[in-house]
Image (tube, rainbow, N blue to C red):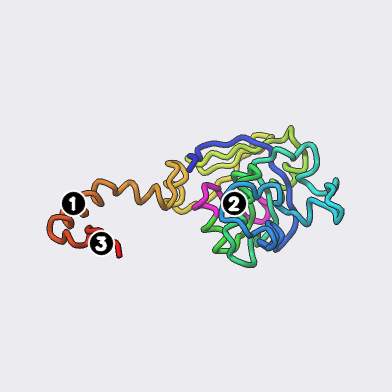
Amino acid sequence: MEKFKTLTAVAAPLNIPNCDTDRIIPARFLKTIKRTGLGKNLFNDLRYKADGSENPDFVLNKPAYRKAEILVAANNFGCGSSREHAPWALADFGIRCVISTDFADIFYSNSFKNGMLLIKVKPDELKKLMDDAERGENARLTIDLEKQEITGPDGGTIRFDLDPFKKHCLLNGLDDIGLTMQKKPAIDSFEGGQKGSQPWLYEMPAAS
Protein backbone atom coordinates (compact mmCIF):
# COMPACT_ATOMS: atom_id res chain seq x y z
CA MET A 1 0.00 0.00 0.00
CA GLU A 2 1.32 3.45 -0.91
CA LYS A 3 2.52 5.55 2.03
CA PHE A 4 0.59 8.75 2.79
CA LYS A 5 2.63 11.61 4.24
CA THR A 6 1.78 14.91 2.55
CA LEU A 7 -0.48 15.70 -0.38
CA THR A 8 -0.93 18.95 -2.26
CA ALA A 9 -3.66 18.64 -4.83
CA VAL A 10 -6.83 19.97 -6.41
CA ALA A 11 -9.88 19.46 -4.21
CA ALA A 12 -13.24 18.82 -5.88
CA PRO A 13 -16.38 20.04 -4.08
CA LEU A 14 -19.17 17.43 -3.87
CA ASN A 15 -22.00 19.09 -2.00
CA ILE A 16 -24.38 16.10 -1.96
CA PRO A 17 -25.52 15.16 1.58
CA ASN A 18 -25.92 11.45 2.35
CA CYS A 19 -24.04 10.36 -0.78
CA ASP A 20 -24.34 6.59 -0.48
CA THR A 21 -22.12 3.83 -1.84
CA ASP A 22 -24.56 3.09 -4.68
CA ARG A 23 -24.01 6.61 -5.96
CA ILE A 24 -20.27 6.21 -5.53
CA ILE A 25 -20.26 2.94 -7.52
CA PRO A 26 -23.63 1.53 -8.70
CA ALA A 27 -24.38 -2.11 -7.89
CA ARG A 28 -24.25 -3.23 -11.54
CA PHE A 29 -20.49 -2.61 -11.57
CA LEU A 30 -19.73 -4.88 -8.61
CA LYS A 31 -19.06 -8.02 -10.65
CA THR A 32 -15.29 -7.73 -10.30
CA ILE A 33 -13.09 -8.58 -7.34
CA LYS A 34 -10.20 -6.52 -8.72
CA ARG A 35 -9.36 -3.19 -7.13
CA THR A 36 -8.50 -1.63 -10.47
CA GLY A 37 -10.71 -0.53 -13.35
CA LEU A 38 -13.58 0.85 -11.28
CA GLY A 39 -12.52 4.49 -11.55
CA LYS A 40 -14.22 4.93 -14.91
CA ASN A 41 -17.57 4.12 -13.28
CA LEU A 42 -17.07 6.25 -10.17
CA PHE A 43 -20.28 8.28 -9.64
CA ASN A 44 -21.42 6.71 -12.91
CA ASP A 45 -25.06 7.85 -12.79
CA LEU A 46 -23.99 11.39 -11.98
CA ARG A 47 -21.05 11.59 -14.40
CA TYR A 48 -22.83 10.22 -17.47
CA LYS A 49 -26.11 10.81 -19.25
CA ALA A 50 -28.45 8.00 -20.32
CA ASP A 51 -26.77 7.88 -23.76
CA GLY A 52 -23.35 7.36 -22.17
CA SER A 53 -22.04 10.85 -22.86
CA GLU A 54 -20.51 12.91 -20.07
CA ASN A 55 -22.68 15.19 -17.97
CA PRO A 56 -20.80 18.51 -18.22
CA ASP A 57 -22.44 19.80 -15.03
CA PHE A 58 -20.95 17.10 -12.79
CA VAL A 59 -17.93 18.36 -10.89
CA LEU A 60 -15.44 15.65 -11.89
CA ASN A 61 -16.20 16.26 -15.59
CA LYS A 62 -15.21 19.92 -15.34
CA PRO A 63 -11.69 20.64 -16.62
CA ALA A 64 -10.52 22.06 -13.29
CA TYR A 65 -11.36 18.88 -11.39
CA ARG A 66 -10.59 16.00 -13.76
CA LYS A 67 -7.37 15.25 -11.89
CA ALA A 68 -8.63 16.01 -8.39
CA GLU A 69 -7.02 13.91 -5.65
CA ILE A 70 -9.03 15.38 -2.77
CA LEU A 71 -12.81 15.31 -2.40
CA VAL A 72 -14.59 17.80 -0.13
CA ALA A 73 -17.91 16.08 0.50
CA ALA A 74 -21.13 16.90 2.33
CA ASN A 75 -22.24 15.16 5.54
CA ASN A 76 -22.63 11.37 5.92
CA PHE A 77 -20.54 10.45 2.89
CA GLY A 78 -20.35 6.73 2.11
CA CYS A 79 -23.59 5.65 3.78
CA GLY A 80 -25.65 2.74 2.42
CA SER A 81 -24.33 -0.74 1.69
CA SER A 82 -20.92 -1.88 2.94
CA ARG A 83 -19.37 -2.53 -0.50
CA GLU A 84 -15.59 -2.19 -0.46
CA HIS A 85 -15.81 -1.37 -4.17
CA ALA A 86 -16.67 2.22 -3.15
CA PRO A 87 -13.19 3.09 -1.83
CA TRP A 88 -11.70 0.97 -4.63
CA ALA A 89 -13.47 3.14 -7.21
CA LEU A 90 -12.42 6.40 -5.54
CA ALA A 91 -8.80 5.26 -5.28
CA ASP A 92 -8.74 4.00 -8.87
CA PHE A 93 -9.97 7.40 -10.08
CA GLY A 94 -7.13 9.03 -8.15
CA ILE A 95 -8.83 10.27 -4.98
CA ARG A 96 -6.45 9.93 -2.02
CA CYS A 97 -8.29 11.97 0.60
CA VAL A 98 -11.94 12.71 1.38
CA ILE A 99 -12.95 15.48 3.79
CA SER A 100 -16.40 15.69 5.37
CA THR A 101 -18.11 16.26 8.70
CA ASP A 102 -19.00 12.58 9.03
CA PHE A 103 -18.71 9.22 7.28
CA ALA A 104 -20.55 5.92 7.45
CA ASP A 105 -18.58 3.63 9.78
CA ILE A 106 -17.91 0.71 7.39
CA PHE A 107 -16.95 2.99 4.50
CA TYR A 108 -14.64 4.87 6.87
CA SER A 109 -12.88 1.68 7.93
CA ASN A 110 -12.65 0.26 4.39
CA SER A 111 -11.10 3.47 3.06
CA PHE A 112 -8.18 3.45 5.49
CA LYS A 113 -7.53 -0.23 4.73
CA ASN A 114 -7.16 0.79 1.08
CA GLY A 115 -4.72 3.62 1.71
CA MET A 116 -7.17 6.51 1.60
CA LEU A 117 -7.19 9.25 4.25
CA LEU A 118 -10.63 10.32 5.50
CA ILE A 119 -10.73 13.53 7.52
CA LYS A 120 -13.58 14.67 9.76
CA VAL A 121 -13.97 18.43 10.26
CA LYS A 122 -16.49 20.74 11.88
CA PRO A 123 -19.41 22.12 9.80
CA ASP A 124 -17.95 25.65 9.67
CA GLU A 125 -14.57 24.21 8.61
CA LEU A 126 -16.20 22.14 5.89
CA LYS A 127 -17.95 25.27 4.55
CA LYS A 128 -14.59 27.05 4.33
CA LEU A 129 -12.97 24.09 2.56
CA MET A 130 -15.95 23.75 0.21
CA ASP A 131 -15.57 27.46 -0.67
CA ASP A 132 -11.85 26.90 -1.29
CA ALA A 133 -12.57 23.92 -3.53
CA GLU A 134 -15.10 25.93 -5.54
CA ARG A 135 -12.25 28.19 -6.64
CA GLY A 136 -10.93 25.50 -8.98
CA GLU A 137 -7.53 24.06 -9.83
CA ASN A 138 -5.57 27.13 -8.70
CA ALA A 139 -6.89 26.77 -5.13
CA ARG A 140 -5.12 23.62 -3.97
CA LEU A 141 -5.23 22.12 -0.51
CA THR A 142 -2.25 20.62 1.30
CA ILE A 143 -2.76 17.70 3.68
CA ASP A 144 0.03 17.04 6.17
CA LEU A 145 -0.74 13.74 7.87
CA GLU A 146 2.17 13.88 10.31
CA LYS A 147 1.07 17.31 11.61
CA GLN A 148 -2.64 16.46 11.10
CA GLU A 149 -3.21 19.77 9.31
CA ILE A 150 -5.04 20.98 6.22
CA THR A 151 -3.61 24.15 4.66
CA GLY A 152 -5.84 26.15 2.35
CA PRO A 153 -4.81 28.27 -0.64
CA ASP A 154 -4.82 31.39 1.55
CA GLY A 155 -2.39 29.82 4.02
CA GLY A 156 -4.93 29.18 6.77
CA THR A 157 -4.73 25.82 8.56
CA ILE A 158 -7.30 23.45 10.01
CA ARG A 159 -6.26 20.80 12.54
CA PHE A 160 -7.91 17.40 12.47
CA ASP A 161 -8.05 14.43 14.83
CA LEU A 162 -7.17 10.90 13.76
CA ASP A 163 -6.86 7.54 15.46
CA PRO A 164 -3.12 6.93 16.09
CA PHE A 165 -3.25 3.39 14.71
CA LYS A 166 -4.85 4.51 11.42
CA LYS A 167 -2.29 7.29 11.17
CA HIS A 168 0.57 4.83 11.73
CA CYS A 169 -0.73 2.49 9.03
CA LEU A 170 -1.08 5.26 6.44
CA LEU A 171 2.30 6.82 7.20
CA ASN A 172 3.98 3.43 6.80
CA GLY A 173 1.86 2.07 3.94
CA LEU A 174 0.53 -0.85 5.97
CA ASP A 175 -2.68 -2.65 5.05
CA ASP A 176 -3.86 -5.80 6.86
CA ILE A 177 -1.39 -7.96 4.92
CA GLY A 178 1.45 -5.56 5.62
CA LEU A 179 0.65 -5.59 9.32
CA THR A 180 0.68 -9.39 9.31
CA MET A 181 4.00 -9.53 7.45
CA GLN A 182 5.62 -7.44 10.18
CA LYS A 183 5.18 -10.53 12.35
CA LYS A 184 6.81 -12.84 9.79
CA PRO A 185 9.86 -13.75 11.96
CA ALA A 186 7.55 -14.80 14.81
CA ILE A 187 5.28 -16.69 12.41
CA ASP A 188 8.25 -18.51 10.84
CA SER A 189 9.59 -19.38 14.29
CA PHE A 190 6.24 -20.77 15.40
CA GLU A 191 5.79 -22.83 12.25
CA GLY A 192 9.33 -24.16 12.50
CA GLY A 193 8.67 -25.38 16.02
CA GLN A 194 5.31 -26.84 15.07
CA LYS A 195 6.82 -28.79 12.18
CA GLY A 196 9.12 -30.45 14.68
CA SER A 197 6.46 -31.27 17.28
CA GLN A 198 3.51 -31.95 14.96
CA PRO A 199 4.97 -32.93 11.57
CA TRP A 200 1.74 -34.63 10.46
CA LEU A 201 0.13 -31.22 10.05
CA TYR A 202 2.55 -30.52 7.18
CA GLU A 203 2.39 -33.88 5.43
CA MET A 204 0.68 -33.90 2.06
CA PRO A 205 -2.14 -36.46 1.83
CA ALA A 206 -1.52 -39.30 -0.58
CA ALA A 207 -3.21 -38.94 -3.97
CA SER A 208 -6.27 -41.14 -4.33
**What amino acid is found at the position of numbered circle 2 in the picture?**
Trp
Q: Is residue 166 left or right of residue 201?
A: right
Q: Which residue is mark 3?
A: 206
Between 78 and 131, the one nearer to me in the picture: 78
- Helix, strand, or loop for circle 3? loop
- Disc number placed over residue 69 in the picture, else none: none
Q: Which residue is mark 1?
A: 192
Distance Cα–Cα, label 2 vs label 1: 37 Å
Task: Classify 10 Å Cα crowding around label 3: few (below 14), some (14-19), many (20 and above).
Answer: few
Q: How many marks?
A: 3
Sequence-wise, the earlier of marks 2 and 3 is 2
Residue 141, horizontal then vertical, whole percent: 65, 38
Q: Which residue is outermost to the front?
A: 208
115 magenta-colored = yes
**What amino acid is found at the position of numbered circle 1 in the picture?**
Gly
Between 48 and 8, the one nearer to me in the picture: 48
Which residue is depicted at the point 72% across and 61% down? 17
Q: Is residue 181 left or right of residue 202?
A: right
Residue 24, horizontal then vertical, whole percent: 69, 57
Which residue is depicted at the point 74% across and 39% down? 66
Q: Which residue is mark 2?
A: 88
Distance Cα–Cα, label 2 vs label 3: 42 Å
- Helix, strand, or loop for circle 2? helix
In the image, residue 80 sits, relative to residue 9, either above or below, namely below
To which quarter of the image does residue 195 belong? Answer: bottom left
The image quadrant where one finds the C terminus is bottom left
Which callout, 2 or 1, points to the residue nearer the camera?
Answer: 1
Magenta extent = 111-126
